[in-house]
Amino acid sequence: MLDSVRADLRATLDEIRSAGLHKPERVIGTPQSASVDVTAGGRPGEVLNFCANNYLGLADNPEVVAAAKQALDRWGYGMASVRFICGTQEVHKELESRLSHFLGQEDTILYSSCFDANGGVFETLLDERDAVISDALNHASIIDGIRLSKARRFRYANRDMADLEAQLKEAGEARRKLVVTDGVFSMDGYVAPLEQICDLAERYGAMVMVDDSHAVGFVGPGGRGTPELHGVMDRVDILTGTLGKALGGASGGYVAARAEIVALLRQRSRPYLFSNSLAPVIAAASITVLDLLEDDTTGHGAALRARLYANTELFRRRMTEEGFEILPGDHPIAPVMVGDAEQAGRIAEQLLEHGVYAVGFSYPVVPHGKARIRVQLSAAHSAEDVETAVGAFVAARASLAK
């Protein structure tokens, strides 16, 4: 590398650190769980984990782990190919069928990640004759996916239905109009008003796409996500999501949609056509996760969802009682607002000293002046774990006030 380029990159990294925006990566020496062993300052130690997307606590579930071990023996380690060449096994087709049934969609196509799923939709379905209308706080993968398409781009203020209607009018007589939103916005824990979005989309002849990564598995009466929560499962045209959060926490994503949409994605979606197939062990373990969530005889899924929301309610209530500012809602994403990026980083360090692992989020992940500690509750936590986390926040605040 040219020395001048290295010098420029080092200067940029120095600027990131001096602004308090550097994002350290902790090394975990245990399986993902309610508590993990985190290397901090060269010393390993067990801490309560309040920053994972392990909403249902299934990342180290014994039945899921056993299914993964059996899948290695039955299906092997990896496919070493893409789907249309020799990368499709029975287990992939079974998972696609199970996801379609679970989500109430006609068909499903698997991707190596939800980032790839969102990256493969817009370019395939839309061209310069079309329009995409996107919520201002949509995930980066949606933003990047839209950039790949030639469609006209419109943006509406977060969850602002008057602005959405204005943008739909502005889109005019586009051949195809697609409204796209996160089901749950990952930095705030806010839920999109899908019933109103579907009403407007139908009024203006638009399709609706929802990225439900932070909802599938635990939001809604049966854990089928925000479309189920709002009673619009049959009105959402495209549903994307991940297997890497509540559904076992590994990796992989999907698009569940109308049959013709999925059929075209199989023929034209570049991340699907040019990326290796999802590892069969993940596909098999994900089927077991769906077995657990859909088994009405044991009520396992319902019990996990109830525990998750009990923990969420307890944390939000106790933190409010202790005088912390938490964005309103009932989602297990519970952002503790700080404002200053450096202060958020210091609080996160203090929390770790008190045995709680939670990460400070600052620019560019959130806007300048909106730094926060994003706490994420899990069904794997106990009530005692939640009280410990609240106590750690109180202790961290006292330490920094000295």
Image (spheres, rainbow, N blue to C red):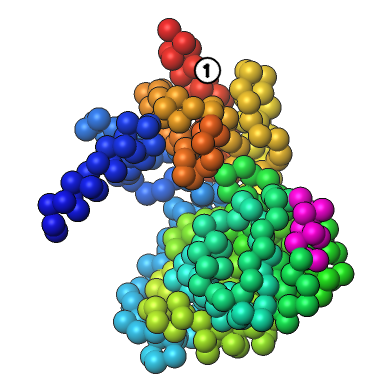
Left or right placement of residue 19 versus residue 216 in this view? left
Residue 309 lies, with reference to residue 84, above or below; the image says above
Range covered by the magenta-colored residues:
160-169
**Residue 289 x %, y %:** 55, 63
Taking 373 as reference, is 261 above or below it? Answer: below
Whether residue 77 is visible here, answered yes or no, is yes
Amino acid at the residue labelled 1: Val
How many tags in the picture? 1
| Secondary element at tag 1 | helix
What residue is shown at x 58% (from left), y 59% (from top)? 213
Q: Quadrant of the N terminus?
A: bottom left
167 in magenta: yes
| Quarter of the figure that contains the C terminus | top left
Q: Quadrant of residue 355?
A: top left
Q: Residue furthest bottom?
A: 85
Residue 178 shown left or right of residue 280 in the figure? right
Residue at (28% x, 42% y) in the render: 13
Tell me residue 20's x, y (percent): 38, 31
Q: Residues within 10 Å of mark 1 (few under 14, many from 20)?
A: some
**Secondary structure that dominates the magenta span:** helix
In the shown orientation, is residue 208 left or right of residue 337?
A: right
Nearer to the camera, 359 or 31: 359
Residue 295 appears in view: no
Q: Residue at x 52, y 42 (%)?
A: 366
Return the x and y of residue 243 as percentages of the image width and height: 52, 63
Residue 9 position (above or below residue 80): above
Query: Percent position (x, y) of residue 209?
Result: 68, 68
* Residue 98 counted in the magenta span: no
Residue drawn at point x = 67 percent, y = 78 percent: 130
For residue 141, side relative to residue 233 (left or right):
left
Residue designated by label 1: 394
